[in-house]
Each structure stands twice: as structure tokens, then as C-alpha cells.
Amino acid sequence: MTIMKKITIIIVGIFLAFGTFYFFTKFQLGKKSTQTSIKPKQEKITYNFLLLGYGGGVHDGTYLTDTIMIANINTKLKKATLISIPRDLWVKLPTKSGADFHTKINAVYQLELFPKDFPDLKPISTKSVISQISGLQVDGYLSVNFAGFTKAVDILGGIDVNIKKSFIDEEYPIDGKEKELCDKDTEDLFKKAEPFITPGFNPDERNQQFKDNPKLEEFVKNATSSPELAFPCRYEKLEFTKGITHMDGQTALKFARSRHSGADGGDFNRANRQQQIITAVKDKVLSIGFVTKIIPLMNEYKKDVKTDISLDVIKKFIEQADKSKEYKINTFVLTDQNVLKNAISDDRQYILIPQEGIDNWKEIQKNINNTIIGITPIPTATSSAILK
């Protein structure tokens, strides 16, 4: 076994599950330094890692991040804090011309990877944007696509998740069927309805068409407000029951992505479930001998996981391996019930902004810092011990 493979695997347990996906690849680590490392005068005990989850595949939103988390780790206090940032958070990015440019935060990673798509943007990094919002200096990032996440859970033999609330999601999208018309009847209705789904149609003509064909009116209504009814083949019905549930990779991904449930829907509840998944993965990683399972499959993951976490930092955490079970995890989700509020952008997008006003991150930073040091209770924060 090569030293890089050993390092990549060991880091999984030490990063308390945020590094779970790290063991997939030895290829994205920084280059080995040829210089002799010099011990710093003051030992660094606090690290902030950015965790990004994106869909992958081949489509316009390949690198839009559904999951954005900061993992704050204090090696002296043996404590970690997961901070979830909602994808609709409205952020300002710098431009060469000085023109105002705001976007949802879930687009920042894609803009970083493909800067030529917006030539007026100055060079950006997702890490710096997250640092600006959170007030935390991000030491490194780790991104994983859905395929990598699914493989990770399956390699571990599945995970056990404590579902806190039963829910049904009738609108879980099936990958690859986003444009399916389902059957001949639906295809015919879609051809007739298409002119009235896009802006610029003649209202009188539409009303007459609806009068002559009631099915067309119903289809247009469903296509714009209840697409699972208009295009049922595009969606899968999910049902999760409260209690401990064993999940394979696909099931865990669906649990983490679902957001159209009346009982547990929306991005904020989804963020809480994503944190549950990370905790469940951490528990599994620390409770089984998984090394022999992963080694033969290492090469499969070079396209699924990317990171810029340095080898020196990894070695630092390897020294903490025997203490990983002592760590405690706190969680905090930025929501419209604590530090954010709902808004509409100038181009009519639903967005989230700080309660103090657009681009004002001061109170958010204060709440994040309070959560980390534990000086004030926050309703959305929970705490659990690693391996009771």
C-alpha cells in the first residue's frame, strides 16, 4: 500500500466524516514538498474546511452546489462544528468593470471553474467568498459529486440514519428524465401548451384554446405549478419513516437531496438531513475495518472528488488519529428563522439575504462564532458525541 493511499484513507476518520469522500482519491492531493518542513512557532489548532456537493454529469448546472458546508475543527478542544449555508444565499462577486454582480451562492463554484463564461468577473475562489460570509478563514476545500457520494456509502456497506421525521416527497427528480414527455398524449398536449407556457403569448388566444380544450388548461396549470402531475415519468415518489433506517448509496443521496415534502421540505430541512448523513457516515467509518474494501477501488474516484487540502495538513491530522473518537460535533444551519430573510432579486429570483440587509454579514459571522465557541444557545444547533 503506498503512503498516499494510507494517508488518504486515514484522513477519513480524522476529519470526522467531512473527509469521508477523501479516501476516494490519491490524485487530487497537493504535490509533495521537497523542502524540509519547519515547525511553526505557534501550533495551529483550528481548521476550517469547505465541503461542497454537486450533481456532476453533463448539463448546464453540472457544478451547481446543492450542499455547502463549513467544517470547523478544533484539535485542542476535540470539537467540530458543521455550518450549513443554503444554496439561495445572495452574494456579491467582484467585476473588472465595477458593475454590480450578484448571484446565488450555489453558482460560485461553477463560476470559479469556468470564469470565461462571465469575462467581466475578476478571478474568484469559492473559499474566499465563504470566508467573507462566515468570517472564517477557509484552509482548504473538498468537493464531491453525486456519483462519488453514492459509491462512498455503498463501499461502506451502507449507513444507519436516525430519521427524525416521517415524510413523503412526490417530486423527487429522476436524473436523465428532465425533458421526458412521458407518453403520446402528454406529447400532444405539450405541443399545444408550449406557446402558453413561455412569456409573450396572446391571452385571448390562450383563453379560447382553454375553452375549447379543458384538458389543455389543466395541463398548462400542472406544467407550471405541479410538474409531477403533468410529467409523472420525470419524478419518483420518496417515502421515509421516522426511526433508524439502513440506507445504501442511492437511498442516502435521495434522503439528502429531497426538498419537496410538505412535512420536511425546503432547503433548510434538507441541510439538517445532510448533516445527519455526514454523522451517519462518520459513525460507520469509525466502526468498521474499511481499508481493504477501499484500496482496490481507489482509481475509480479521481473524477468524483477534488480537494486542495495540503499534505502537511493531512499529516497533522494523522497525528490525531487515536483521538478521533473523542471529538464532539455541533451543527448550525443558516435559515430564515435565525439570521436570514426571504427576498426577491431584481431579476425576480427567490433569494435569501441577511436579516440586516443585503451583503451585511456581520450578524451571521457573530452567530457562527457563537455557535463554534458555545457561548449562546441557537435553536438549530445540536450536539452529539462521536461513538457513544
Image: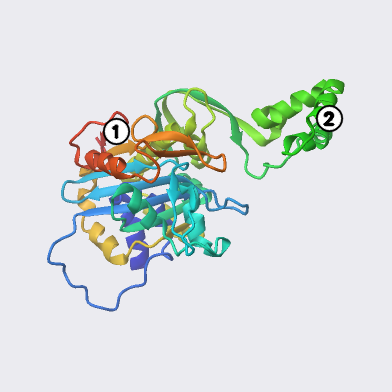
Residue at the outermost front position = 98
Point 47% across, 26% down: residue? 264
Q: Disc 1 and disc 2: Cα gap in Å?
A: 54 Å
Which residue is at the front of the view, 356 or 285?
Answer: 356
Point 53% across, 40% down: residue? 250
Residue 100: mark = none
Residue 381: mark = 1
> Horizontally, is 365 left or right of 115 in the view?
left
Question: What's the residue type where badge 1 is placed?
Answer: Ala
The x, y position of residue 45, in whole percent, is 19, 55
Of the two numbered discs 1 and 2 in the rendering, the one whose residue sits closer to the viewer: 2
Give neighbour class at mark 2: few <14, some 14-19, many 20+ (Cα, 10 Å): few
Which residue is at the front of the view, 315 or 231?
Answer: 231
Point 33% across, 67% down: residue? 3
Locate the C terminus by quadrant: top left
Pointer 2 residue: 205
Give the quarter of the image for residue 373: top left
Rendered view: 78 above or below 99: above
Give neighbour class at mark 1: few <14, some 14-19, many 20+ (Cα, 10 Å): some
> Horizontally, is 145 left or right of 331 in the view?
right
Point 70% across, 34% down: residue? 233
Which residue is at the front of the view, 194 or 77?
Answer: 194
